[in-house]
Image (tube, coloured by chain):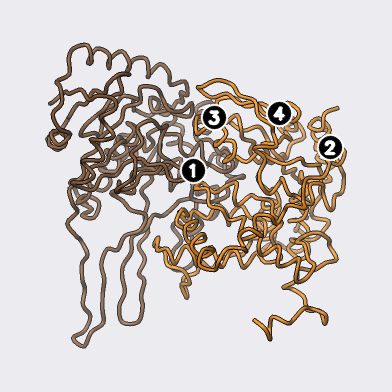
Amino acid sequence: MSIEKRLQEKAVELLSEKKVDVVVGYEAGTLPYQAAPCFIENPDDEGRLVLNPFCSVNLAKYVHDILMAHKASQKRMKPEQRTKKVVGVVARGCTTRSLVIHLQERQYERDQIFIIGVPCRGYVSKKKLAAAAGGKEITACAIINDRLSFTTPDGTKEIPLESVLAESCLSCRYNNPVISDVMVGDPAPPMKPDSEYADVDAFEAMSGEERWNYFAEEMKKCIRCYACRNTCPSCYCKVCFVEQSQPRWVGVSVDESDTQAFQIMRLFHMAGRCVDCGSCVDVCPMGVDLRKFLKKLDKDGYNLFAHRAGEKMEQQPPLSVHSMDDKDEFIYEP
Amino acid sequence: MEKKVIKKDALAGIVKKLAGQMPVYAPVQDQDNVLFKILEQGMEPMLDFGNTRNAPKNCFFPQAETMLKYFRTERGRELAGVVEGAPEAVLFGVRPCDARSFILLDYVFDDPKYKDTYYMERRRKTAIVTLACVHPPSTTCFCTSVGGHPMSSEGADIVLADLGDRYLAESLTDKGAAILKKFGDLANADDAALAKKKELSEKSEKEIKSIIPGNDIKPWLDANFDNPFWDTIHKSCLACGTCTYLCPTCHCFDITDEVKRDGGRRIRSWDSCMSWLFTQETSGHNPRTSQKERWRQRLLHKFRYFVDNYHAIACVGCGRCVQYCPVNIDIRKIVTDISKL
């Protein structure tokens, strides 16, 4: 039985047995290379669920949104009228790590989520796919085993699927769920995590000026639509500092320094909290390379604190805890 | 007006030469994206592209602009306006859908009652050169469903059509005729060129396969403000501004004062109905409490309120929001779904 079919059966089972109120998953999109997040509340709708390499966005963001909205709706109710909401979520490795971060940060209780773990062999980067098609429109797209074929007005072409997988996926260390309530499908073979910091190493080798110039150039592309922030499961501040007006931290105009300030602040807020799901890169309409900077923070988190975000429930994020054996040389030797 | 033909390989040179005389906005390749930018030395205008990532509205209605400045002085408060005379400019390589967006934006910014001096100054001084779509650039194009046409000259001062071996250039306004003169000595168009354009125009229209019932949903929208349908479209929305910022017709703006010590400036910047700050009142109250209401606003503004106010749909069918929505919320599907209710 295909993994998709098993996933659909699991959704029916969970919804019919009232174990969950909603299953957050993916459905087929309206474009040949897209899958869209979907929310199944009725067991009869289970047929909409798909699972393929076009499923890109990290669904943990929606789990948080749904549970927060529910919490807010319960506020003015009498205690006896309050209900519990359980969200089922189709989760691959990175999604489960984001859920772990939510749990560690006490956003909701473990029994409010039901994790339907799925193996992952990487998702297709829309940007890489567009580049492979030479910027021409893709009118059809199909994946057969490890090959991807796409059709443009110039004809049909077949390429290795790996050549268009997102950078985050190629060097992913956790492509199988780190926690789950039920696992659908067999674990996926490992990706190539040993190369995960190759990009960062090259970036670190550059001079400070070169690094700043690279950052400044990338930020010039940003149109401040905040898609990166909004898709990020770790970006859940009720009011983001960029939107605060008393005081106003960041100007509303398109001044370069304002855009840089927003991105720098967001990046630093991700220290020890970024699972490298690649969603922010995937959703950016302008193709800003955010990953390099996030990965640098991730590398520092590992080197300084032996911490990988969302890896284990027991391991708290480094900036949330203090331990007597924390490295502290940097305080004296900047 | 004038009808001329331009040799295929001469056009890029003409545009670059023009850019030496006045600001010329043209589509240029900027890393992965094709963007409208002011053509500078060494930049190559693109002639063969689908459509630009960003809409050209930025040229007249920038994402942020200073409206006025103020200072606290010993004499009291002083104001300084910043309406500067815009230079004569050319906006080159606009697709017909985007050119049409300016007609819609004019309804708002050049209203008989309210004239937006900031927008109008730039709009009046800029000639728009449309590059007609002899083939629809994308399967997500649906201009014909919302009152447009792939070879339309609406909103253009000059319209260029690629006839295969040469371009047909037609000026439609005095502003266009003046710019066409600057293109240099060009041969007059013959009947064959005009016939070819007509043929291409009919062919291109047929090639648009994405058809939506854009004109049919108004009565439903008028009557169904509280319909449960509105609970179904927003759930996956990230509430980012991609759709509204890339949209050629979205024109909501916000006005903010930025104060530093003894002075400040008043800035107008794009607003987005997708943002939770949209219509947020000073008290903290927002009549649109969730993404559901914001999505309803987006749909109703485009397909109901704008039609009531200006007798046109505030959508030109460029398909940018369809292509670039990170979570694939497809306005074509929404409109089609509504038409079936």
The residue that mark 1 highlights is B32
Chain identity of mark 4: A
| Relative height, residue A82 to residue A163 (above, below) | below
Report the Cα–Cα distance between label 4 and label 2: 28 Å
User: In the figure, residue A54 lies in which quadrant?
Assistant: top right
Q: Position of residue A63 (x, y in %)?
A: 71, 52
On the picture, is A107 further left or further right than B337? right
Q: What colour has chain B?
A: brown
N-terminal of the pair, mark 4 or mark 2, is: 2
From this viewpoint, is residue A78 visible? Answer: yes
Q: What colour has chain A?
A: orange
Q: Position of residue A201 (x, y in %)?
A: 66, 60
Question: Which quarter shows the N terminus of chain A?
Answer: top right
- On residue A134, the disc is none
The residue that mark 4 highlights is A147
Viewer-nearest residue: B45 or A22: B45
Residue at x 30% of width, y 30% of height? B131
Report the Cα–Cα distance between label 1 and label 3: 34 Å
User: In the figure, residue A74 lies in which quadrant?
Assistant: bottom right
**Tag 3, which secondary structure?**
helix
**Tag 2, which secondary structure?**
helix
- Label 3 CA crowd tier, 10 Å (few <14, some 14–19, many 20+): some
**Tag 4, which secondary structure?**
strand
The residue that mark 2 highlights is A10
The residue that mark 3 highlights is B337
**Tag 1, which secondary structure?**
loop
